[in-house]
Structure formats: C-alpha cells, structure tokens
Image (tube, rainbow, N blue to C red):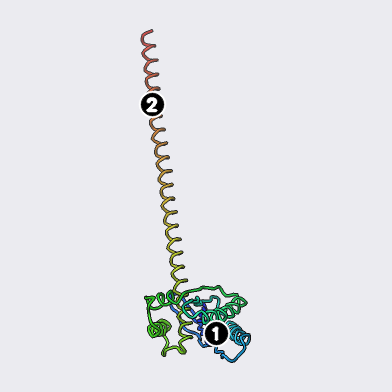
Amino acid sequence: MVILGIDPGLAHTGWGVIETRGAVSRARAYGCVTTYAHEPIDQRLGKIFKEISEVIGSYHPSQLAIEKIFFGENERSAIATAQARGAAIVACAQGGLTVGEYTPMQIKQAVVGTGSADKYQVIYMVRTVLKLDHDPHPDHAADALAAAVCHANLLRTQALTRRAADDEAMREADRAALEARADAAREVTAAATAANIQRDRDGKVAIATRQSRISTRKAS
C-alpha cells in the first residue's frame, strides 16, 4: 500500500510518500511545496494543488494522511493553513485517495509513543521506522512522513483487529458446530436406547404370550 502524508501550510506544505508491506514501511519520496507571501493567494493555493497532484501522479498513493488544524492563539495562521489544507485535499480527492485525518498529538503518539514528543524525537523515529540513512528535511517533510507512518500503523491495527474478530467468529462457529454434532449424537443415542428398550419389552411380551398359550393347551 502506498500512503501520502501531508503537513499542510500556506508557506510550506510538506509531503511524504511511504510504501507498506505487512509490518514494514519504507519511504519512497518526500519534499515540500513552498510559496511566498508576496504571491497572490490564488497562485499560492494553485501551486500547492498542482504540485500535490504531480506527486499523486508520480507515486500513485491510495491513502492520504493529513494533519488536522490546531486552532491556537494565531487564528490568522490557522486560516491560512486551512486554505492550504483544502487545496491539498482537493488534489487528493481528484486522485481518488481515501482520507485519514490526525491531530499532531495523535501522530506523535503513534510514531514516538507519547503525544508530547518534540520534533527531534519525531524525526528520529521517522528515520528509524523508515530505515533512512539520514534525517528527513525539511521538518515539514518529516512531519508529513510521520503522518503517513501514523496512518499505516492505524490501518495495520484495524486489520489485526478485524482478523482477530474473524478468528473469534470462526472459533465460535466451530464451537457451535461441535455442540450441534454432540446434540445430534445424543439424540441418536437416545433414540437407539429407546428402540432397544422397546424391543426388549416387545420380546418379553411375546415370550409371556407364548408361555400363556402353552399353559392353556396343557390345561385343556
């Protein structure tokens, strides 16, 4: 499976493509879309859309992992990030990608093991998990790769959960089948026992009848 991770931002939109095979994930490519404050907003958003579309066309991901927006103190910055995020998501929608959204805390928790990890810990774990021989740069690209790794971990966990549920359902079905066969065997045994008892009774009645006839003949 090929996953595209995106760390949205109007000035810097990081992207990273990973490929997963079972429990193994490897980076295929990563980079950053850069726009500048002096450029008109339509050109900036158009550039994000165009370059993310080109990434999708080159690597053919089927899944998107993108950071959710954190509305902190800087509302203006959050709005700009939301615009960039929208441009990236539209590109992914046209490419037919399935979207997964995660908060920065969720990504850190999935990649590092704690939601309070700093960026250096995230970079180190991304490098370790993806078996890179260098730290991915810029930071926006590393964050995008982290989002992709988070998504891969979630999909793997969901698959294991479904498999465990399917296995339990199969075991339950097997138990039910065994119980049904046991019940059927008990019914057959009970029927055979009843038939044997009835034959014994019929045999005793027949013997008694013959003895009664013999006695009657002798008396006459």
The residue lying at 37 percent from left, 24 percent from top is 204
Residue 36 horizontal/vertical position (percent): 56, 91
Decide which of 104, 23 is in the foreground and name it: 104
Decide which of 71, 122 is in the foreground and name it: 71
Q: Which residue is mark 1?
A: 10
State whether residue 36 is above or below residue 204: below
Marking on residue 159? none
How far apart marks 1 and 2 lie (CA) works out to 95 Å
Q: Are marks 1 and 2 in contact (CB under 8 Å)?
A: no
The residue lying at 44 percent from left, 88 percent from top is 136
The residue lying at 36 percent from left, 17 percent from top is 211
Q: Mark 1 vs mark 2: which is more N-terminal?
A: 1
State whether residue 181 is above or below residue 76: above
Residue 79 horizontal/vertical position (percent): 54, 79
Quadrant for the C terminus in the image:
top left
Residue 118 horizontal/vertical position (percent): 38, 82
Label 1 SS: loop
Decide which of 114, 198 is in the foreground and name it: 114
Label 2 SS: helix
Dividing the picture into quadrants, the one containing residue 203 is: top left
In the displayed structure, does residue 42 sit left or right of residue 165?
Answer: right
Between tags 1 and 2, which lies in front?
A: 1
Dividing the picture into quadrants, the one containing residue 142 is: bottom left
Marking on residue 201? 2
The residue lying at 41 percent from left, 43 percent from top is 185
Tally of numbered tags: 2
State whether residue 198 is above or below residue 161: above
Q: Amino acid at mark 1?
A: Leu
Near mark 1 (Cα within 10 A), the count class, few <14, some 14-19 or many ≥20, is many
Q: Amino acid at mark 2?
A: Arg
Decide which of 57, 105 is in the foreground and name it: 105
